[in-house]
Image (tube, helix red, strand yellow):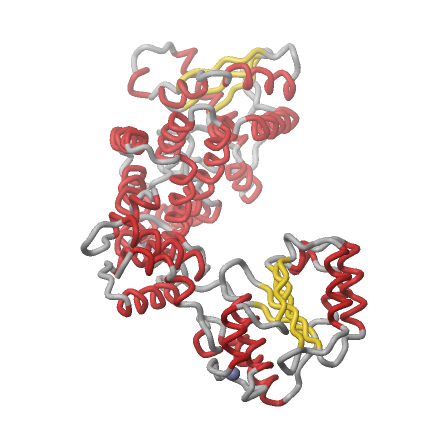
Amino acid sequence: MSEESYLVLARKKRPQKFSEVIGQRHVTTTLQNAVKTGRIAHAFLLTGTRGVGKTTTARILAKALNCENGPAPEPCDECANCRAISEGSSLDVIEIDGASNRRIGEVRELREKAKFAPIQSRYKIYIIDEVHMLTTEAFNALLKTLEEPPPHVKFILATTDPNKLPPTILSRCQRYDFKTLPDNVIVEFLSKIAKDENIEIEDEALKILALSASGSVRDALSVFESIISFSEEGKITAKIVQDILGIVDSMFLADTVQAIVNDDAQAIIKLTSQLSERGYDVDSFCEHFLKFLRDIIVISAGEDNAAGTLQGLDLKKKLSAQRSFDEWLMLFNLFYECSKEIKRAENPFLVLEVSLLRCMRSKFTVPIDDILNKLSSSERESRGFPRNEDGSKQSRNRENKSLFESQSSYNTNNAKFSAKESSPPNVSAGIQTVPLSQSDKWNEFLRILEKRSIILNSIFSNGCRKVFHNNILQIFVDDDITYSTVNMGKNPLIISEAVKEAFGKEVKLKIEVEKKEKECNGKISKEEKKISKDALIAEAMEDRNVQAILNCFPSRIVDIKN
Ligand SMILES: [Zn+2]
């Protein structure tokens, strides 16, 4: 096959009959029935995204109406009229591009010409593509023709954006909505073409092609064409398609997700630098990474066969089983927020790297139900009841290292709350329990940050410990990585301004890395221990889950143990 003949693949494969239109049976059958029963509207409106077959169907409908052997539910495609329409030379089928002929002049001309009877065929048919692009005046002129169309005139309007059409136009058309094509339909279509044209191509390569077309047959075909002309002799592999399209392969995406799951910072750093070395576009990586996570979530919800999950299905299934649905959801949300930040960044690779590290370290907020379940099961145990099956299951789950495990010092994994009968609330000397107004200010601080830096917002939203004392706001971040992120570039300025706006000018800010108990052993005095215990209690009182428990059970926090 010569190179020229590849280039006409799209034209060669353009459907000429209703039965050849792919994936739009609901439209073609209804149109065929209308022609068969003779109930033919004056105006048809075909809607749907680009490349799903609207214009093609419009031409087939024109053929069906004007076929010498018709009107026929399926045009013969052989008579002079059918051939002329296929070649675009029919004098009675006039195609107008709404995008370039959008002014009133063109529509007036159309109205004038519409008065004359068709020259060679039954109907004078106007196909107006991208009709939503017409100007208001042009719409008004068109409306007059639509209101009282001469009996020999038919309109077929096509649009990607029906919402932009005036209701007066919409109400005068019979509307047909085209579907975006599922990946498997496109895969099937391309695979048939490959067979017809003797092109050897891997199944996985077809899936990548289909995915890149986002439901448009035309896009799928044109990408397929360019891949055929770019690739050398021999089988077209998934690798070739990925390289030509500049797509990060599934394996790479899977490795990145696995590194996050495994808490493997080294792997994340290595993968990000590979991405940069290979010259991939960060935005495109983010888009594919989010799609990949979406597929894992969909699989995690038990929908293995949902649209889009086809490519790299085994990898996604394997990953999906490693964490819970909620955890995947959290990872998606976090990375989605980060991706907005990455788009705005001057050095996107840097922000991408830190974002992935943040995803790795991010916290999993323990649902209140879990705490209540845990409390009730430990209560049962303390009364000598054996653990029920559910409780033991939960304890097993909790022992598994959670992807977004909370490292807060008062989480359910390592803290015990002693519940006693009602006592006055505990307010210790020195460090105050942060009153509600302070917590409002903290939320305001987070809101301000959200507008200025999603990453900073996510760092401080993650339940980091904070102590407010003598107009000093002390925030403890988890680790050195987070600490360096907080101090990167303009971040210190952004944070201090947000603190001033939320808490007032007089408030000073101190950010420190949370010291682990082990490192502190033996180095802190009794007094410091007392203060840190009070601070922990004050902090625990701030937590919504703890507040909920305190509301459920008349109690106060006596101690927090690791
Ligand atoms: Zn015909």
182 or 496: nearer the viewer = 182
Viewer can see residue 463: no
Viewer can see residue 120: yes
Which quadrant would the N terminus be assigned to in this image? bottom left
**Residue 374 place in picture, x, y as percent:** 40, 46
**Residue 182 place in picture, x, y as percent:** 43, 64
Can you tell which quarter of the image residue 410 is in? top left
Which quadrant would the C terminus be assigned to in this image? top left
**Residue 352 place in picture, x, y as percent:** 39, 31
Total marks drawn?
0
Q: Residue at x 33, y 44 (%)?
A: 398
286 or 82: nearer the viewer = 82
20 or 524: nearer the viewer = 20
Above or below, 186 relative to 229: below
Q: Residue at x 45, y 79 (%)?
A: 19
Above or below, 555 relative to 71: above
Above or below, 160 relative to 329: below
Q: Is residue 103 left or right of residue 7?
A: right
Q: Residue at x 67, y 71 (%)?
A: 155
**Residue 94 place in picture, x, y as percent:** 63, 68
Q: Residue at x 46, y 36 (%)?
A: 339
Can you tell which quarter of the image residue 310 is in? bottom left
Residue, far front:
119
324 or 85: nearer the viewer = 85
